[in-house]
Image: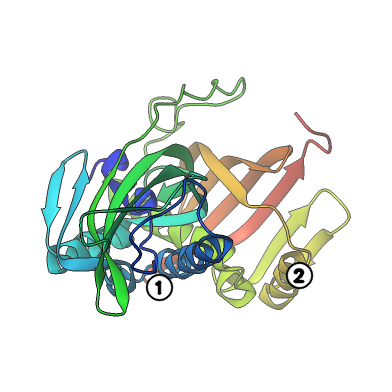
Amino acid sequence: MKIRSLLSVVGFAISFLLPTVAQQTKTPDPQLREQLLAFVTKYQEAINNGDAAAAAAFFAEDAVLVNDTGPVYGQEAIEKYYAGVFQDVIFSNYIITVDQNYPQIIGKAGDEAWSTGEWRSTVRGENFGPIEQKGYWSVIDIRKGDATKIRMLTWNVIPVPPAPALTNAVSSSAQEQKAVDPEVRHQIDAVGMKFRGAMHKQDAAAAADLYALNALKVVDWAVGTLSGRGAIEKDFAAYFASSPSEVVGKLVQMYPIGNEIVFISEWSSGPFYGHTVRIYLRDADTWKIRLEYDNSSGVPR
């Protein structure tokens, strides 16, 4: 699935409850804007929860969603589309902005409206990301009884320049010391996906469960050395309680040493960045983090 096609879920512009009136001024009534923000909140909850049914419920039964791979016709097909997206992608930190002069009433009956605006989001999947994306959307809504549904949604993605190459980065494939078995690599990636999901949900227990019972975690700032899964879980809980910035990471290198896997990545959080080295140990049909070392630049880039 192309990354850009996954982003249509972010471009989804929200359906708004609008009173049926004959005319709409260029500047919407403050009450309408308040209703708009309420719908934005509901939509964000659906996306953060990966709830395809809730997302599709914003559409009329005969709605059309137009993305860069072509149109998707009907609410049922749109729900299946979202379900496929949520299997592969985690969305976070996305913001939907509605142009200040919208929504506007259109149509002779006054039961339709259109809106435009911008969107931005961080997206990540098992084999890509995090990626910052943004673009524009346009939507036509139609009133159905006491509710308003989307009749047609279109969106686009603004191309962004690639991030500069890391001066100390090593290719994750061509320059590895030894090749990691593809199946093992897939299993390690799956553990990484679970870790990113736990961090996004700020779930200390789920994050700590990815470590071995006797794991060691060494942090080069005030924390020091954490010994055992219990201590690591407490540290995650304290970290999440501090309302941290989103942490993003990028693979630098992965290679096997005996029966273990060394995983090196670069991370960033707000203006700060550093590196993480993990050693993964086989545990039944999965892998656990046996040792982790985190360092920080200590200063912004």
Point out the tag, 1 or 2, that comes first from the N-terminus: 2
Nearest to the observer: residue 268 or residue 189: 268
The quadrant of the rendering that contains the N terminus is top left
Residue 257 visible in the current orientation: no
Q: CA distance from mark 1 to mark 2?
A: 32 Å
Q: Position of residue 124 (x, y in %)?
A: 43, 49
Q: 92 above or below 211?
A: above
The residue under label 2 is: 241
Number of numbered markers: 2
Vertical side of 164 occupied by 82: above or below: below
Residue 242 image position (x, y, % from top left): 79, 64
Q: Amino acid at mark 2?
A: Ala
Q: Residue at x 70, y 68 (%)?
A: 236
Q: Is residue 35 left or right of residue 105?
A: right
Vertical relation: 168 (above or below) 96 = above
Q: Residue furthest right?
A: 222
Which mark is nearer the camera, 1 or 2? Answer: 2
User: Does 235 sit left or right of 180 as displayed?
Assistant: right
For label 1, the residue is: 284
> Which residue lies at the image location 51% right of the left edge and 26% below the top edge?
170
Report whether residue 108 is seen: yes
**Residue 214 horizontal side relative to residue 249, left or right:** right
